[in-house]
Image (cartoon, grey):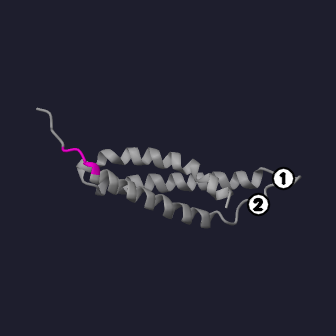
Amino acid sequence: MAEITKKSGPLALLAGFGLFLLFELVAYQVLKFATSGLGMQDQMQPENTIVSNWVKTVVFLLLHLALDVVAVLILSNRMPRRHRGQLMGWFYLSLLTGFLLLWPLFNP
């Protein structure tokens, strides 16, 4: 007989969204501080080079990916079974958000 599991309700989704926003806000601030020494402040110069800003971009994305993977590994063991179905959706959204966070990182 198939196991019937109780799905998480709208309140759990709202709580997950709030925790997702909190995670992304803290991750952005920490990674912004960690990559503050990389890149050029004034990118719009005639002799502009993409190399230093490329390094900042790659480091930011790799650190964001590492934070995402560590968070998923920790949460997947500590979350109740009925809420684990949300976890991969938030993970995929966080991967997309990592690329979207590049916009405020380079446009203060």
User: Which residue is depicted at the point 73% across and 54% down?
Assistant: 53
The dot on residue 59 is: none
Asked which secondary structure carries label 2, the reply is loop
Q: CA distance from mark 2 to mark 1?
A: 9 Å
Report x, y in % for residue 39: 73, 59
Which residue is located at x 24 percent, y 49 percent? 81
For residue 103, side relative to residue 87 (left or right): right
Q: Which residues are magenta?
A: 6-10
Query: At numbered mark 1, what does the secondary structure look like: helix, strand or loop?
Result: loop
Q: Is residue 15 magenta?
A: no
The three-letter code of the residue at mark 1 reads: Asn
**Quarter of the rendering occupied by the N terminus:** top left
Percent coordinates x, y for residue 49 in the rendering? 81, 51
Residue 36 x %, y %? 66, 65
Of the pair 87 and 66, the residue shown nearer to us: 87
| Residue at the spot 70% in from the left edge and 62% down from the top edge | 38
Q: Residues within 10 Å of mark 1 (few under 14, many from 20)?
A: few
| Residue tagged 2 | 40
Left or right of 101: which side holds 12? left
Check contact, mark 2 vs mark 1: CB within 8 A. yes
**Which numbered tag is attached to residue 48?**
1
Name, please, the residue furthest toward the top.
Answer: 1
The image shows residue 33, relative to residue 1, as above or below, that is: below
Residue 31's spot in the image, x, y percent?
57, 62
- Drawn side of residue 73 relative to residue 44, left or right: left
Quadrant of the rendering where the C terminus is positioned:
bottom right
Ranked by sequence position, the earlier of labels 2 and 1 is: 2
Q: Residue at x 60, y 63 (%)?
A: 32
The relative height of residue 94 versus residue 18 in the rendered view (above or below) is above
State the image quarter where residue 23 is shown.
Answer: bottom left
